[in-house]
Amino acid sequence: MSDSTDGRIQLLSDLHLEIERGSRPLYEYDFPAHAPNLALLGDIGWTRDSRLFEWLEAQLARFRRVFFVSGNHEPYVSTLACTPVFIRHY
């Protein structure tokens, strides 16, 4: 039974949204929500690409909370220091 205190977390990692996959546009990945919270655990996309943050914004609209943990590929060809700050609390 789910309610407003539901602590379930859906986990995703290693999406590599920065990699071309046929005709599908970069940073396009749709998946069903199975929990109120989403944990993105590394290697989701490049932090130097604004499309990653647009995709993260879309997830914030779908989930109560989104936890984003940077992996070793997020700052690829860049640094985390060059990454825009993306922290939002609701």
Image (cartoon, helix red, strand yellow):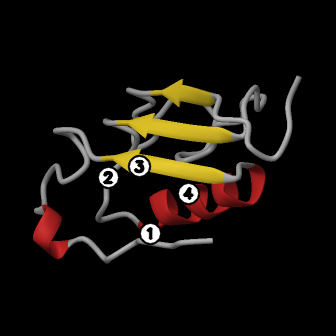
Above or below, 41 relative to 88: above
Please name which of the two marks, 4 or 1, marks the residue nearer to the observer. 4
Q: Is residue 22 visible in the rendered structure shown here?
A: no
Residue 62 circle label:
none
Q: Is residue 26 visible in the rendered structure shown here?
A: yes
The amino acid pointed to by label 3 is Phe
Q: Is residue 48 left or right of residue 50?
A: left
* Disc 3: which residue: 68
Find residue 81 and report its image quarter. bottom left
Instruction: Tell me how far mark 2 sits from mark 1, CA to CA.
Output: 9 Å
Instruction: Tell me how far mark 3 sits from mark 1, CA to CA.
Output: 15 Å
Above or below, 76 relative to 42: below
Please name which of the two marks, 2 or 3, marks the residue nearer to the observer. 3
The picture places residue 15, in percent across and down from the top left corner, at 45, 30
Task: State which tag comes first along the sequence, 3 or 4.
Answer: 4
The picture places residue 31, in percent across and down from the top left corner, at 72, 30
Q: Secondary structure at mark 1?
A: helix
Residue at image point 53% right, 46% down = 26
Instruction: Tell me how far mark 3 sits from mark 4, CA to CA.
Output: 9 Å
- Crowdedness near tag 2: few (<14), some (14–19) or many (≥20) residues, C-alpha within 10 Å: many
Instruction: Tell me how far mark 2 sits from mark 4, CA to CA.
Output: 12 Å
* Disc 2: which residue: 46
* Disc 4: which residue: 56
Find residue 60 and report its image quarter. bottom right
Instruction: Tell me how far mark 2 sits from mark 3, CA to CA.
Output: 13 Å
Task: State which tag comes first along the sequence, 2 or 3.
Answer: 2
Q: Is residue 9 left or right of residue 12?
A: right
The picture places residue 27, in percent across and down from the top left corner, at 54, 47
* Disc 1: which residue: 50
